[in-house]
Amino acid sequence: MTQTLVLFIAGGLMLLMAMVEVVNLRRTGRLTFLTAAHVLIAIGYCLPAFLLAFLPGTVWESRPVSAMGPNPWGSRLYILDLADALALPPGAYLESGLILVGGYAMLVAGYVLAHSRTTPPSLRGGTLPLPGLVAGGLVLGLIAAVALTTFASQFDGLRHMIEVGLAVRRGNATVQWGALQVLAEVAFPASLMLVAAALRSEGPRRAMLAAASAAVFAVAALRLAYAGGRLDAAMIVFTPILAWILVIRSRTLAISVLVGLGAVALFLGSIDPLFFRDPIRTLGNEFEELSTGLADNVLYMLAYLGFPHVAAAHTLTVAPGEIAFRHFADIPLGLAYMLPSFSGVETLPPMILSLHVKLLPWIPVDLFSFGYYSLGTVGVLISFAAFGALLAMFDGWLTESTGWLGQALRAAWLFYLPFRLLYADPYATLQSGFGLITGTLAIIALALWAAWRRDRPKGL
């Protein structure tokens, strides 16, 4: 009976989100940040309830997925092993589902209330001064190149650096100056700025700026090879393409390209992280597995991304017992941890992520869990309301921007911001988004400066 209620709540929430999306689509005529949030809420919190209800007893329950997968408890389908290992009472899933409905209502309320508020200046084509755009891209690109070069000097060549990156990602190795590879993330927004500058230039200057952009993009790609993140890879690969689609505004071409991007996204989501270490050797095997087992790969991705459903229910059973309410202290702690991480000194209280992974190895802190760890049900409502307001702010700013740079930022933030539903730990959020956040702030500062110069009284 309890499981039936859980399924009813999950299905009802998906139906409600579909109705809100239809209204939003009719009002705006485009896909928005709220659209991406709807998809991820369905994948992370709603669909897993059906997987847990209908997959046990089928071939999916016992079929091995990957000997190298991120499952610390076994080799069955990820979400089934996770649920069985925790053995949560059915009432925990029912309670988390009810709180999630309230959280979603607050997300929509925050989105609606914040949508008409003041946002950063729109990046309309040609409004940013070209010299400032070039200078910003070159400075950020130089910082990234120096940071990554210094970081790489501790390794015995590029291959060694990439191999160590996989070990660090799995917690089996440590490196020096780890903050430098985080600093190198600014290469990506720097390359976007230089591309935008090249598109507004002509002749030899365009060629020079294009070459500079390619060099800076290579720095971003090299840092990605070390870090090996799927979301980072998707952002770097897809952002320029999506920006081009959004600029030309051809619906037929957009649908065609998006179908192709969906196939690539499926590939990136289902491959083993080892692919990033030796893509030439492993590409054939990965493509063959994807093409011959499409259903397996889709289900694997849904199960892999369905951890918030289980993690949210688990949080209700350990907070405020094993982990006391944090009262949102992790937000300033996340900011503070970004500073000592540059020097290697860690004397601050532990972040919620470090406490969370002791209970759930390999499982990120999702937005529901972050809110509940912070202040129980009230914390979830506050977190979702604030998240909805953030989605509205970026919709109001980037969706109305024109030109390649504005749409490139829109595409990049579409990859980054909605996924905070699944990866909401403040420190991990700041670390993974450091480059995008820094580059965006630099562009906002440039846009504000240009607006001030344009609107200032004459004679000043």
Image (tube, rainbow, N blue to C red):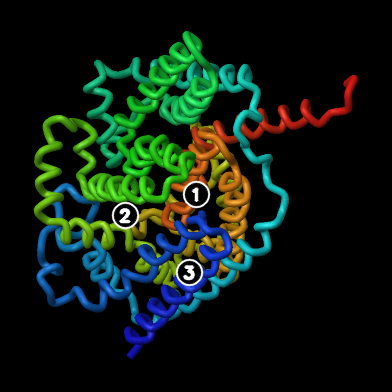
- Image position, residue 391 (x, y; %): 56, 54
Quarter where residue 178 is shown: top left
Going by the image, does 445 lie left or right of 387?
Answer: right
Quarter where residue 315 is shown: bottom left
Disc 2 versus disc 3: nearer the observer: 2
Q: Residue furthest top?
A: 204
Going by the image, does 407 lie left or right of 278?
Answer: right
Disc 1 versus disc 2: nearer the observer: 1
Q: Residue at x 62, y 37 (%)?
A: 123
Disc 1 versus disc 3: nearer the observer: 1
Going by the image, does 69 lie left or right of 442?
Answer: left
Q: How many marks?
A: 3
Q: Gap in Å between the C-alphas at discs 2 and 3? A: 19 Å
User: Is residue 444 visible from the viewing direction of this image?
Assistant: yes
Query: Given contact means CB atoms under 8 Å apart, are the residues at marks 2 and 3 in contact?
Result: no
Q: Circle 2 — which element? A: loop
- Of 242 and 373, nearer the camera is 242
Q: Residue at x 27, y 69 (%)?
A: 83
Q: Earlier in the sequence, mark 1 or mark 3?
A: 3
The residue wearing badge 2 is: 361
Residue 15 circle label = none
User: Is residue 183 visible from the viewing direction of this image?
Assistant: no
> Dot 3, crowdedness within 10 Å: few (<14), some or many (≥20)?
few
Q: Circle 3 — which element? A: loop
The residue wearing badge 1 is: 417
- Image position, residue 201 (x, y; %): 53, 18
Q: Earlier in the sequence, mark 2 or mark 3?
A: 3
- Of 352 and 264, nearer the camera is 264
Which kind of residue does numbered mark 2 sit on?
Answer: Pro
The residue wearing badge 3 is: 321
Q: Earlier in the sequence, mark 1 or mark 2?
A: 2
